[in-house]
Image (cartoon, grey):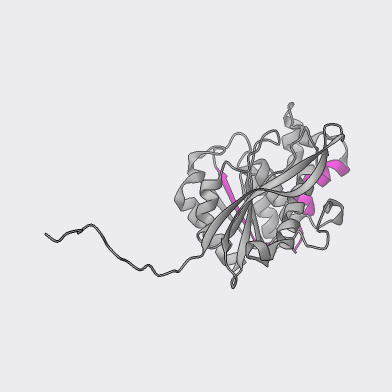
């Protein structure tokens, strides 16, 4: 037997860039503790280091009923998505007790602008932004994709656009009127007067839907008792009426935030959606 038979010399063809996780990146600052102090809003960014290529960016928004959220909870899945050809950013936003509507929407739009302003740093194609999120994050994903009013553009990098070119909300509320009126413990995020028609109109994604909306992939469990499946059906029909490119994926027998959402086949579908729509 030859000596050192377990020693090899190999050469691996380089076909992928090196990926990095840039944690706790401050993208906005807001007043906190009765406006006496300043609080940073941060994001975690997974990006490829390259000098000669740009990639689509997908922003992820965590759910939690506007009372909790984590920008780190889904990093394992976002890392896998990144290695399939995207920059991914998991974004923090203010919760309901910190800033009622439209606070979190303002935050997500500020995050989009920040990423566009720093596109060169993170190898981002400024014309290819997608947004995805679950539950409360799905609501914010829908609103980010649909709302184009300047009144929600606050903070830094106002010379940049907060528009996105594709959206994938998971089990997201879209018709807030019935949900809020039926829920005696509605989240503080919707602390406004629910008898005010103007307020109810402003918080509903359907209000902001126009023919300029980007493509949507809606994903929802058929047995969701937290945000009923009909909520995605309502948004699907409204998008279809405007001739918007939309697909509704119903997960049979699945509830709210169930395990089906975190299986590879679903992430394959979402990946294919963003590849097709963002190019």
Q: In which quarter of the image is the N terminus?
A: bottom left
- When the figure is inspected, residue 208 is found, relative to residue 39, above or below; the finding is below
In the foreground, 185 or 236: 185
Q: How many marks?
A: 0
Residue 211: name its quadrant: bottom right
Instruction: In the displayed orientation, state which residue is furthest to the top.
Output: 184
Tell me if residue 213 is in the magenta stretch: yes
Residue at screen point 84% across, 56% down? 149
The x and y percentages for residue 99 are 80, 38
**Looking at the rendering, which quadrant does residue 120 occupy?**
bottom right
What is the magenta range? 198-221
Pick the front one: 132 or 2: 2
Q: Is residue 177 left or right of residue 78?
A: right
In the shown orientation, is residue 59 left or right of residue 264?
Answer: right
Residue 124 shown left or right of residue 6 in the figure: right
Q: Which residue is drawn at 77% across and 48% down?
A: 28
Q: Which residue lies furthest to the left in this view?
A: 1
Q: In this view, does 263 lie above or below 226?
A: below
Residue at image point 87% right, 34% down: 36
Residue occupying image coordinates x 45% and y 69%: 15
Q: Look at the image and tell me whether residue 117 can be seen.
A: yes
Location of residue 20 by image quarter? bottom right
- The percent position of residue 157, horizontal first and vertical second, equals 81, 58
Q: Quadrant of the C terminus?
A: bottom right
Look at the image and tell me whether residue 213 can be seen: no
């Amino acid at each position: 037997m030859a000596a050192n038979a377990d020693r090899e010399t190999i050469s691996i063809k380089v076909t992928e860039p090196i990926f990095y996780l840039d944690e706790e990146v401050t993208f906005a600052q807001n007043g906190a503790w009765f406006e006496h102090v300043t609080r940073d809003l941060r994001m975690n960014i997974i990006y490829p280091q390259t000098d000669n290529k740009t990639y689509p960016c997908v922003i992820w928004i965590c759910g939690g009923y506007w009372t909790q959220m984590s920008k780190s909870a889904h990093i394992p899945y976002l890392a896998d998505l990144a290695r399939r050809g995207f920059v991914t950013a998991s974004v923090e936003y203010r919760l309901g007790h910190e800033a009622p509507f439209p606070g979190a929407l303002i935050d997500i739009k500020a995050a989009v602008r920040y990423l566009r302003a720093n596109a060169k740093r993170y190898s981002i194609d400024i014309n290819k932004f997608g947004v995805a999120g679950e539950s409360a994050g799905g609501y914010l994903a829908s609103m980010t994709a649909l709302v184009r009013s300047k009144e929600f553009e606050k903070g830094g990098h106002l010379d940049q656009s907060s528009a996105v070119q594709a959206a994938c909300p998971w089990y997201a509320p879209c018709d807030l009127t019935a949900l809020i009126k039926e829920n005696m413990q509605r989240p503080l995020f919707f602390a406004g007067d629910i008898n005010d028609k103007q307020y109810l109109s402003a918080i509903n994604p359907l209000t902001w839907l126009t023919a300029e909306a980007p493509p949507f992939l809606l994903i929802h469990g058929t047995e969701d008792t937290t945000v009923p499946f009909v909520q995605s059906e309502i948004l699907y029909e409204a998008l279809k009426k405007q001739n918007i490119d939309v697909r509704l994926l119903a997960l049979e027998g699945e509830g709210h935030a169930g395990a089906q959402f975190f299986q590879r086949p679903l992430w394959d579908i979402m990946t294919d959606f963003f590849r097709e729509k963002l190019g």
